[in-house]
Image: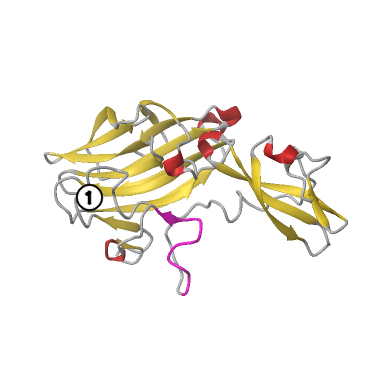
Amino acid sequence: MTNLTGLSLRGVLLAGLIDTPSGDWYAYLFRDYGAVGRIPYLVPVKWEDGWPLLGVDGKVPDALNLPASKGLIPGIVASDEFERKPGEPPLPLVWQWNHNPDNRFWSLTARPGFLRLTTGRVDAGFLSARNTLTQRTIGPECSGTIALDVTNMKDGDFAGLGLLQKNHGLVGIKKDDGVSFVVMVNTQSGSPIEVERVPLDQKTVFLRADCNFKDMADKARFFYSRDGRAWTAIGSELKMRYTIPHFMGYRFALFNYAAKSPGGFVDFDFFRVSDRIGLDK
C-alpha cells in the first residue's frame, strides 16, 4: 500500500499523483508550516507491485533535482501593475477575494492602470469588510508593496495593505474628521489595537509589509513611504500565528472599508511582491 508514515511525521499530507512527459512520477502534497500556512511539496514516487511508494526511503527529501524556476514561484504569487490588454482576464488566478465580491464596487477600468476599491456599505472592521483582494504569502521570507491614491476617501474610511488572518496586522490610511493618518493596527492579542498613527499631508502613499517565516520565526513588520524610496517602520512587530479560522495561512490583503458612510474610493497603482525583505532587497 501507499507509504505515508514517514511523510506524516513531518506534517506532509494529502497527496495527489502527477506524472511528467519523461515518465517521472511525483506526489503533490502540502505541509503545515506555521503562519505561512500550507506550503506545497513535490515528493518523488516509485511504483512497486502496482502501488505508489512516496519519498526516498519513506521520507520527504530536502531537495529535488528539478529544472530551475523561471520566475518568482510562477502561478502562486505575482506582482501586478493593474494594466490590462484587451482580452486579458481582469484578475489573474493568483488573486482571491476574501468574500464573494460585490462587482459593483471594484474596477480596473474606471481608472486604467489602477485597481479601484469603492466602499459599498459600512463595516465594523477589517475581517467583515467586503471586496478585500488577497494573495498568499510565501516563505522563507517575502515582502508586499503597494502605491495608494487616497484622494477620494470619505470620513471614517480605512484603506491599505494588510496581512489577513484572525490575528491580523494592517498598515493603511484612516480618515478622521477630515484629516488623513497613516495607521498601523496589530491584532496579535486577539483584538485589533491601533499602535501608531502619523499625519499624512499628501494624496499618494506607499505601504509595505515584510514577513519572516524562516525556521517558523513568523514575524512581520509594516512600513510607509512618502516617495517609494525612503521607508519608515510604523507600529509594532506582528507575531503571526496560524489559526484554524484562516487555515490557509497569512495573506497579503488590499482593503478599503467604511466606518461611517459608503461611497468613498481609493486607487491602488500597483502591488509588488518580492521573496526578500528589508536590506536584502
Dot 1 alpha-carbon crowd within 10 angstroms: few under 14, some 14 to 19, many 20 or more: some
Question: Magenta includes 276?
Answer: no
Answer whether residue 281 is visible to the viewer in this image: no
Residue at 22% x, 38% y is 201
Using the image as rendered, state which of residue 34 and residue 207 is in the foreground: 34
Q: Main secondary structure of the magenta part?
A: loop
Residue at 40% x, 32% y is 222
Q: Which secondary structure, mark 1?
A: loop
Question: Magenta includes 88?
Answer: yes
Q: Where's residue 259, x and y in %?
A: 18, 45
Answer whether residue 133 is visible to the viewer in this image: yes
Extreme residue in the right direction = 49
The residue under label 1 is: 151
Using the image as rendered, state which of residue 266 and residue 254 is in the foreground: 254
The answer to which quarter of the image holds residue 6 is top right
The span shown in magenta is: 87-97
Q: Where's residue 50, x and y in %?
A: 84, 59
For residue 22, side relative to residue 232 (left or right): right
Using the image as rendered, state which of residue 260 and residue 264 is in the foreground: 260
Residue type, numbered disc 1: Thr
Q: Is residue 46 above or below residue 221?
A: below
Extreme residue in the left direction = 177
